[in-house]
Amino acid sequence: MPETPEQLLAYDREHVWHPYTSMTEPTPVRLVESASGVRLRMAGGTELVDGMSSWWAAIHGYAVPELDAAVRRQLDDMAHVMFGGLTHAPAIRLAERLVSLAPDGLEHVFLADSGSVSVEVALKMVLQHQRGLGRPLRTRMLTVRGGYHGDTFGCMSVCDPVGGMHSMFSEVLPQQVFAEQPPAPGGDVGAWAAGFRALAGAHAHELAGIVVEPLLQGAGGMFVYDAGCLRVMRDVADEHGLVLVLDEIATGFGRTGTFFAAEAAGVVPDVVCVGKALTGGYLSLAAVLCTGAVARGLSASESGVLMHGPTYMGNPLASSVALASLDLLETSGWQANVARVGAGLSELSSLRGAPGVADVRTIGAVGVVQLDHPVDVVKATEAAVEEGVWLRPFRDLVYAMPPYVTPDEDLARICTAIERAVLVA
């Protein structure tokens, strides 16, 4: 049995498959022994400031007393119980909290076990809703280039089919309808809207819904677009009887500066997916909220029920820590913290015009440097680690999504690490 750090890493290299990594020629990994605050403590004693919030989820940092206590309290009652035919207070209270936080009208909650699953559930909701309305031929989704919605098959079908990471599966995926990527803030929304409206009109007879990430496209390229585009999508959905699905898995709970990103556009979706930061990064949990109209349409379909039921749906531990995370979010002054983090990351603007840099953009507590070439991930990661920061660059991007509680001095360190990474990438 591997015990020393060296033995653990050696076994990992031979047997453990990491995300988006070759098993036969894996890139290096680093061994984390513990985490607290905004720091990861590595084997050997080195500490790294986490610039990624563990893929955007650990918004409060690590070893958070309020969240630790919530898990311990729930363990005294039960860690898990099936949700089929049974229910429990943590799930009910979480559903109530989500309904109270969501825009008016989103009143029904499906508790899934991951972000990808929540998108799959949302797509099923849309299809079953259309069937319930007597429109079974409406089976395609309208979305935009540059999007990312998860790694399962339904999700992959609405990710960018050319520039996305799932292009090799394009021939076996459902063929969806893709509009042009929305323009950046201040861009020509009118011209884009004309194309979007025309595309929707041409395919209206076969379209069931629209699905997009609001304002910030995540793993598809960290692209920020104009809020006016969301209002166009809402209008188009209403005009053609489409269900508007907003994937707020990465953007929800304050990350872009409003509690939900769609609030910046004044848009209320018919279905919304949330995850990642929902539990503060403690346990995997996601949720799908929908309107009463969507629920009624779905219930009129031939099955009469939503055809999905994850084993760990509504897990009590995850539900309890999610409630504690939402409590902490509301009492910790997240708006001020997100604004402060954003101000710290705005220092990245000094990289505009630097050699190899194509663009620099920030929104809320997100800072992105886009290069004019693919990142050398190993070199860029090593450069950031030498500055005492953990980053995970990908494609042509070096970016940060730090915990909201990251101190100013650590934000400055993150910016320095990004600059170093850009120079070697």
Image (cartoon, helix red, strand yellow):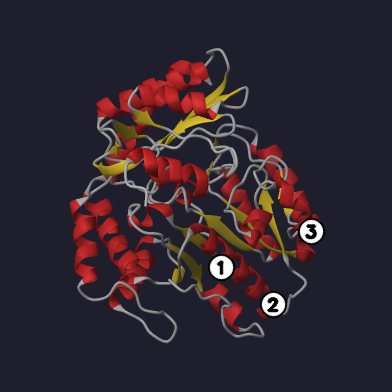
The mark found on residue 131 in the picture is 2
Q: Secondary structure at mark 1?
A: helix
Task: For marks 3 and 2, give the one nearer the viewer.
Answer: 2
- Say if 404 sits above or below 274 in the image: above
Question: Crowdedness of circle 3 by 10 Å Cα count: few (<14), some, many (20+)?
Answer: some
Query: Residue 118's spot in the image, x, y percent?
Result: 52, 63
Position of 201 compared to 53: left or right? right
- Residue at 57% x, 27% y: name it: 375
- Say if 287 sits above or below 424 in the image: below
Amino acid under disc 1: Val
* Front position in the image: 55 or 301: 55
Does residue 188 appear in this view? yes
Q: Secondary structure at mark 3?
A: helix
Amino acid under disc 2: Arg
Query: Residue 322's spot in the image, x, y percent?
Result: 32, 61
Position of 208 compared to 234: left or right? right
The span from disc 2 to disc 1 (Cα, nearest Å) is 15 Å
How many labels, in total? 3
In the picture of the structure, the residue carrying the numbered disc 3 is 203
The span from disc 3 to disc 2 (Cα, nearest Å) is 17 Å
